[in-house]
Image: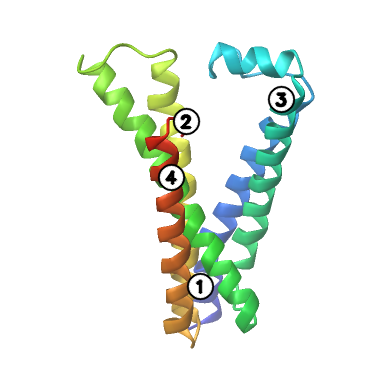
Amino acid sequence: MSSKQTELSKWPGYAAAVWGVLFAIPSFGWATGCTFGAQSTVSPSLVELAQDRVPWFVAVLVGTGLLKAFGAVIGVGLTRPRGRRLGRTMVFCGSAAAILLTWHGGLFVVQGVLVKAGAVAPAELVNWYLYLWGPWFIAGGLAFAGAVAEYLRRCADRRALTRCGVVGALGALALSVAAVATGIG
């Protein structure tokens, strides 16, 4: 593979990293009580929790911000082959992120389409979730999926790495389905 092809194959990892950073910023901002951008795009009950600086919700915002920042690190990590253990961790986490984000965004889009079609009762802020948040999550999921695919393409130990990716993806899917089934997702 030429150096130009190698550089081009890194863009999904960098896209995932940029996605993680851009998505972490609002979480940290909202954790400080600044709800700029949230009042019209996020459920009012969540905005109120952020504005009131409810301790458990601030902890959730900081935790999700850290997870998103960690996702940025994973995205960068997927831009070049790593050692065996670190490579497996990168593929596991990247695959899990790809599934979690794509699934979550897909749920937003499907719900929005169902509301627009009149099949379910109108939901609060449906347009924001249908046209912004759903596609945003899906874009992040696709960036991580692309980063993992490119990482695997460049590695000699594809079989073991692919198993790690499958375990991460299936674990993330099981967690997501359980969260939806229990009403917390």
Q: Which residue is mark 2?
A: 133
> Which mark is drawn over residue 47?
none
Q: Which residue is mark 3?
A: 30
Three-letter amino acid code at the position of disc 4: Ser
Q: Which residue is mark 1?
A: 151
139 up-or-down from 9: above or below: above
> Which mark is drawn over residue 176?
4
* Relative side of 168 to 66, left or right: left
Point out residue 34 in the picture as x, y percentages from the top left corner: 75, 19
Q: Earlier in the sequence, mark 3 or mark 4?
A: 3
Q: Are marks 3 and 2 in contact (CB under 8 Å)?
A: no
Q: Earlier in the sequence, mark 3 or mark 1?
A: 3
Which dot, 1 or 4, sits closer to the camera?
4
Q: Are marks 2 and 4 in contact (CB under 8 Å)?
A: no
Q: In the picture, residue 169 is in which quadrant? A: bottom left
**Secondary element at tag 3:** helix
At label 2, counting other C-alpha atoms closer than 10 Å, the crowd grade (few under 14, some 14-19, many 20 or more) is many
Q: How far separated are the C-alphas under marks 3 and 1? A: 34 Å
Three-letter amino acid code at the position of disc 3: Trp
Point out residue 3 in the picture as x, y percentages from the top left corner: 56, 79
Q: How far separated are the C-alphas under marks 3 and 4? A: 24 Å
Q: Residue at x 64, y 66 (%)?
A: 77
